[in-house]
Image: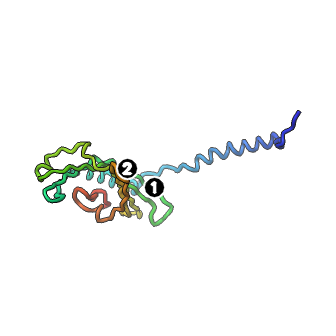
């Protein structure tokens, strides 16, 4: 009979290791969980902001602009998907941080006259880009404030672009702005 090079563990040691693992497993699983936050002013007001943003974006209409001599461009946007998220922080100054992720598509068509451009029905064939806007907000215990934003643009046949979005761009009225996504 050949003996193993490894020392044989005592049954009591194995039992202790198993017991430690069985106790550690549920504690490890619970460590990643947090208690659901009760609905408070931060969550309620951020839900209202996300709703206002969704309604604002749903009301966007295609717009026509001159794009060069003898050329007009019709630009339109798909219905946007607005995904809100509120996270509790450990900071007493900013107890909550909010994020809105807005996904939409931009479509464009070109025509020689303004009337011809306005008459074009935009279809998926006119797709210019898929866009994802991410806006970050902070809550100071009283109200939400816009902090920063970025836009990820994916265009067929081109490299993806990430651009910072300024407060002026976000708060602009009109078809390219996101004024309805700003805290009031």
Could you say where residue 93 lies in the image, as x and y percent from the top left? 45, 66
The crowding category of the residue bearing disc 1, from other C-alpha atoms within 10 Å (few below 14, some 14 to 19, many at least 20), is: few
Tell me the distance, in whole angstroms, between the alpha carbons under discs 1 and 2.
Answer: 13 Å
User: Secondary structure beneath disc 1?
Assistant: strand
The crowding category of the residue bearing disc 2, from other C-alpha atoms within 10 Å (few below 14, some 14 to 19, many at least 20), is: few
Outermost residue toward the top? 1
Q: In this rendering, which labeled residue sits more in front, label 1 or label 2?
A: 2
Could you say where residue 61 lies in the image, as x and y percent from the top left? 20, 50
Of the 4 image quadrants, the one containing the N terminus is top right
- The residue at 83%/41% (across/down) is 8
Could you say where residue 141 lies in the image, as x and y percent from the top left? 41, 63
Left or right of 42 on screen, residue 7: right
Q: Is there any visible trace of residue 12 in the rendered image?
A: yes
Please, is residue 84 above or below residue 9 in the view?
below
Residue at the disc numbered 2: 83
Residue 23: which disc?
A: none
Outermost residue toward the right? 1
Residue 87: which disc?
A: 1
What sort of colour scheme is used for the picture?
rainbow
- The residue at 31%/57% (across/down) is 181
State the residue in front, 104 or 113: 113
State the residue in front, 140 or 14: 14
Left or right of 71 on screen, residue 11: right
- The residue at 34%/54% (across/down) is 153
State the residue in front, 141 or 79: 79
Number of numbered discs on residues = 2
State the residue in front, 181 or 72: 72
User: Secondary structure beneath disc 2?
Assistant: strand
């Amino acid at each position: 009979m050949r003996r193993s090079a490894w020392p044989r563990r005592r049954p009591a040691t194995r039992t202790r290791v198993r017991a430690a693992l069985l106790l550690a497993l549920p504690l490890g699983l619970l460590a990643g969980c947090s208690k659901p936050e009760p609905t408070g002013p931060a969550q309620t007001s951020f839900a209202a902001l996300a709703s206002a943003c969704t309604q604002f974006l749903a009301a966007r209409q295609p717009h026509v602009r001159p794009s060069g001599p003898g050329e007009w461009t019709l630009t339109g946007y798909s219905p946007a998907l607005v995904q809100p998220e509120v996270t509790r922080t450990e900071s007493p100054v900013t107890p909550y941080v909010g994020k809105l992720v807005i996904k939409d598509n931009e479509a464009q068509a070109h025509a020689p006259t303004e009337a011809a451009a306005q008459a074009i029905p935009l279809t998926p064939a006119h797709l210019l880009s898929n866009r994802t806007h991410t806006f970050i907000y902070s809550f100071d215990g009283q109200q939400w404030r816009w902090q920063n934003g970025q836009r990820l643009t994916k265009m067929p046949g081109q490299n993806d672009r990430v651009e910072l979005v300024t407060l002026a761009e976000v708060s602009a009225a009109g078809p390219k702005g996101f004024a309805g996504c700003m805290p009031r």
